Image (cartoon, helix red, strand yellow):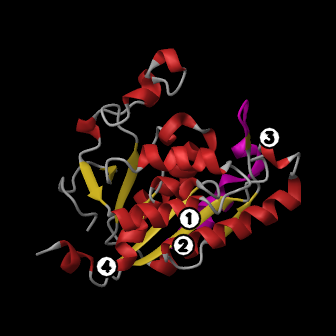
Amino acid sequence: MNEQQKSKGKSILAIFAHPDDELFVAPILSRYVKEGVDCHLAIATDGRFGMAPHMNGLAGDDLADLRRKELLSAGKEIGINPPISMNFADGFSHKTPVLKTALKDLSDLYDAVLKLIEDIDPSVLITFGPDGVYGHPDHTTVGNVVTTVFQAMSPAVNTRLYYPGICIQDFPELFDTDSNSFDRKRYGLDSKNLPIKINFSADDAKAAHRSLSCHQSQFTQSGIDAMCELFHRHGYVRFRAWDGNYEDGASLF
């Protein structure tokens, strides 16, 4: 069975913490949309604490409103269903891990995630793994809640759960201690722990680039260009299955 046949009639639900977190999987979503997969994206927080220096102090409700608009535009560029804003309060400044406080009651997030999964009934669920890609507390919290919901529903649902990750071997410069990038011991994942490589085309990379360019409140265009050049250079995104039981290979289905 080829990849197109595997994808036929399938659906994906990606759940992340902030508007722009989809950048990690945007080219993959673009690819699967072209293969006829029903692709959904849900974002837990409103991103109001994502204040960037180049935005001259834009914050609060105004920033949250802008980020919702940016998210909708970003979704259009990769062809997915209109992204779902769950509108929980953003819970993190880079010094204070307060998502659990900002959400007030994690059971609310649990209930919202549960309803999403029940409504969409995805073939594949994507969220942050325990590493949160680079340890962001909002990432790890949202990933933990999604995983908890999934485990509570499994095996009653026929859904696969995957975590995207950044591989040390693919991006050694990010884990170079001299450059003060990612902490290799805390966040670096070896290729053997990210055995699933999902390829994407040059057109998918371009769509993902346009999508990330919608998040002008978070990044300068030069920063966007640099991120896309870095993360798209291999032409694939690495994943790991939540329990390690799915086949290694080139498909999420």
The residue that mark 4 highlights is 35
Q: Give the residue at mark 3.
A: 53
Q: Which quadrant holds the C terminus?
A: bottom left
Kindly state the secondary structure of the residue where label 4 is placed: loop
Name the residue located 36 percent from the left edge and 47 percent from the top edge. Answer: 233
Q: Is there CB contact under 8 Å for labels 4 and 1?
A: no
Image coordinates of residue 109 in percent, x first then y, are 64, 60
User: Which region is colored magenta?
Assistant: 93-117
10 Å neighbourhood of mark 2: few (<14), some, or many (≥20)? many
In whole angstroms, how far apart are the C-alphas of marks 4 and 2?
Answer: 16 Å
Image point 19% across, 80% down: which residue? 5
| Residue plotted at (51% across, 50% down) | 143
Tell me which label, 2 or 3, sits earlier in the chain.
3
Say what amino acid the circle numbered 3 marks. Pro
168 relative position to 192: left or right: right
- The circle on residue 77 is 2
Give the mark, 3 or 1, whose residue is nearer the N terminus: 3
User: Closer to the N terminus: mark 1 or mark 2?
Assistant: 2
Label 4 crowding class (10 Å Cα cut-off): few <14, some 14-19, many 20+?
some
User: Cβ–Cβ below 8 Å for labels 4 and 2?
Assistant: no
* Quadrant position of residue 173: top left
Image location of residue 104, percent across then percent down: 76, 51
Marks 2/3: CA–CA distance: 26 Å
- How far apart marks 1 and 2 lie (CA) works out to 5 Å
**Which one is earlier in the sequence, the residue at label 4 or at label 1?**
4
- Mark 3 / mark 4, whichever is N-terminal: 4
